[in-house]
Image (cartoon, rainbow, N blue to C red):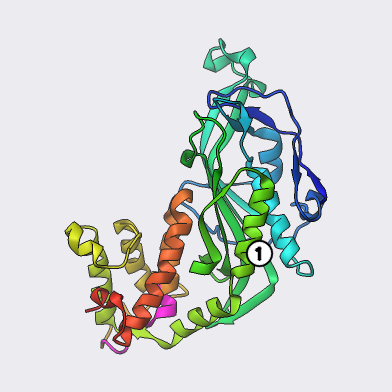
Amino acid sequence: MNTLQLQPVKAINHSIRKAENPLMEVSTGISPILTLPKEETAIRHPKLPFIEANTKEVTMEHLRQDCVVPVFSKDNEITISHPAFIETIWEAAQHLFPCERMEAPAIRVSHVVKGRTPEAIHKPVKDLLEEDKTIYYERMMFCFEIPSIHEDISGSRLNLTIGGVRAYNHENLYSRKSPEKFKVFIGYKNMVCCNLCVSTDGYKAELKAQTTHDLFLSALELFQHYSMAKHLSRMEALQDSHLTAHQFALFIGKCRLYQYLPTEQKRMLPPLLMTDTQIGMVAKAYYCDENFHGSDRIFPQSDEENAISLWRVYNLLTGANKSSYIDNFLDRSLNASQLAEGLDKAVHGQGEYGWFIQ
């Protein structure tokens, strides 16, 4: 196997301190990090962010050069860094799609954790210099498109997209090194709005790995079992099913009621992970969304005139999901797919989602 040499990184434990070994090696089955497109030359067009909430966009260079990497406190073993995670998933994608064109990863982070170098422990805050400070991001999400693999649904171009989430708040960094948790997905990005479309077979909610080699193999297995044709077929089917204005109003109302149902009744229904605020955003977008609104009229003349396709409902849900925090984003994205497909069955008198529109 080839050996992937990662960039030097600084390592810390949970109280922010540097490790002595600045270099680590990761064995994977394919080409080195140099295959990643350079951010300044990669094909990147101005786009809406794929997630908003309290996130900000950063570069790979920033993660490599400016951020420390946590370690497990009990044994000082280093965690898999954010750049190493991104590089490993990129390598797995490149292994599976060696002839396709890939864009540079778009990276969003949140929940910055600040620290100090040992030399600056006793300095007043006002006297701290930039070189005295350390940071890392508790939560990070990235995705990269493969625009050479695309499809069109109802006038929306969908690019094949791969990405993942790392949230250190899901790790016990006060313990000894143990398998680390990641979320990885392969699906499509709607280029009209940059909403992510995730299906069950294209998402691993808890991928555990001790090393980047384990991560590489698990990601590759996920990508190989993902059925692009099946995912696209399910999304295309949503164009042919519609909710009337009355059914859509019932759906919004039932979603608001869902949060307050008795526990026993809620257990009998499929899960709804969208928050009350996000359901309110869906209701607003029904009238105001430029691409997926349900009507051109503020006061519709008839229920039939105001019917909305489930493809549009699905995109209203994934649009509202952009307000989720990074560690909940992919779970809710999958839930939006399940909800839209469940409503499709309910419209035709099948399935357990009938409660939402009856």
Q: Quadrant of residue 242?
A: bottom left
Q: Nearer the viewer, residue 254 or 99?
A: 99
The answer to whether residue 101 is magenta is no
Give the vertical position of 358 relative to 328 (above or below): below
Residue 266 in the image: state x and y as whole percent: 23, 62
Q: Quadrant of the C terminus?
A: bottom left
Q: Residue at x 61, y 22 (%)?
A: 17
Could you tell me residue 246's position as x and y percent?
A: 24, 81
Kindly identify the residue that appears in the image at 43 percent across and 53 percent down.
324
The residue labelled by disc 1 is 145
Q: Residue at x 54, y 79 (%)?
A: 230
**Residue stretch in magenta:** 303-313
Instruction: Return the residue nearer the eye: 47 or 186.
Output: 186
What kind of residue is marked 1? Answer: Glu
Residue 306 makes an appearance in the image: no
Give the SS element for disc 1.
Answer: strand
In which image quadrant can residue 60 be found?
top right
Q: Position of residue 102 (x, y in %)?
A: 73, 63
Left or right side of 128 for 4: right
- Which image quarter: residue 61? top right
Determine if residue 157 is in view. yes
Q: Inspect the magenta stretch and tell me whether residue 310 lies in it.
A: yes
Q: Residue at x 32, y 68 (%)?
A: 283
Q: How many marks?
A: 1
Left or right of 229? Residue 252 is left
x and y percentages locating residue 68 in the rendered image: 63, 31
User: Label 1 neighbourhood size at 10 Å, few (<14), some (14-19), many (20+)?
Assistant: many
Q: Where 161 sits versus 128, above or below?
A: below
Question: Given the current orientation, which residue lies at the most extreme top position?
Answer: 122
